Amino acid sequence: MEITRSTSRTHGARTWWALLGFGAAVTVAAAIGGLGVQGTTDEYAALRQPDWAPPSWLFGPVWTVLYALIAIAGWLVWRKVGFGPALWAWTAQLVLNAIWTPLFFGAGQYGLAFAEIVLMWLAIAVTVALFLRVSRPAAALMLPYWAWVTFAAALNFSIWQLNT
C-alpha cells in the first residue's frame, strides 16, 4: 500500500528548497565525519587491515554518491508524506552516521565504533522498511548505502580484531 499526501507539497519552489535542505542535512553529517578523519590518513594506513580492505582514496567518492542518494531518498519520502516516522528514522540513521567516523578515526575506539555501526545498520534497516511503505524508489536509493554500511561494519570489526 502506497501512502500519498496532497500534491501541494510536491510542486513549486518549496519542494526544491526542501531538496536543498536534505542535501544540507547530509552535508552536515559528512562534515562531522570529515572533521573526524582530519590528520588520520597515516594512522589509518598504519593499522593492520584485512587483505580485502579498499584503498583509502575510495572512501571519498563512494560516500559522495551515497550521501546524494540518502538526501534524494529522504526528499522523496518528504514529498509523499511530509515529516513523520519514516523521516525520523532517516534522521536517526544520519545522526548515527555522523557519530561513527569520529569514534573510529578520531578517537580510535574501534570496538565502540563497531557497536555504533551495528546500531546504524539497524536504523538503516528501519528506514528502508518505512520508506518502502511510502516510496519504493526512496527505499531502493537507500540500498547501496545499506550495503556499504554492511561492508564497513565487517571492515570495522576486522580492523578492531586485528588491532587489539
Image (cartoon, rainbow, N blue to C red):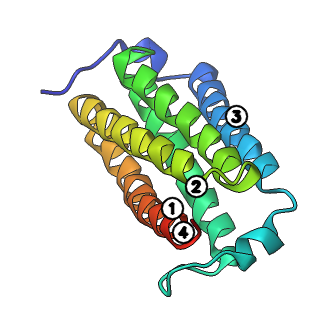
**Is disc 1 in contact with disc 2, using a CB cutoff of under 8 Å?**
yes
Of the residues tagged 1 and 2, which is closer to the observer? 2
Query: CB of mark 4 within 8 Å of CB of mark 1?
Result: yes
Tell me the tag on residue 24.
3
Is residue 122 found left or right of 41 in the rendered image?
Answer: left
Front position among marks 3 and 4: 4
Label 1 sits on what residue type? Asn
Residue annotated with mark 1: 156
Q: Secondary structure at mark 3?
A: helix
> Circle 1 — which element?
helix
Earlier-in-chain disc, 3 versus 2? 3
Give residue 94's quadrant in the image. Answer: top right
Circle 4 — which element? helix
Q: Amino acid at mark 3?
A: Ala
| Residues at marks 3 and 2, CA–CA distance in whole angstroms | 28 Å
* x, y percent for residue 153: 44, 58
Residue assigned mark 4: 159
Can you say whether 13 is above or below 6 in the image? below
Give the amino acid at mark 4.
Ile
Quick one: label 3 or label 1, which is nearer the N terminus? Answer: 3
Of residues 163 and 60, the one nearer the viewer is 163
Q: Quadrant of residue 19?
A: top right
Task: Give the residue pinned by disc 2.
Answer: 110
Q: Within the image, what quadrant is residue 108 found in?
A: bottom right
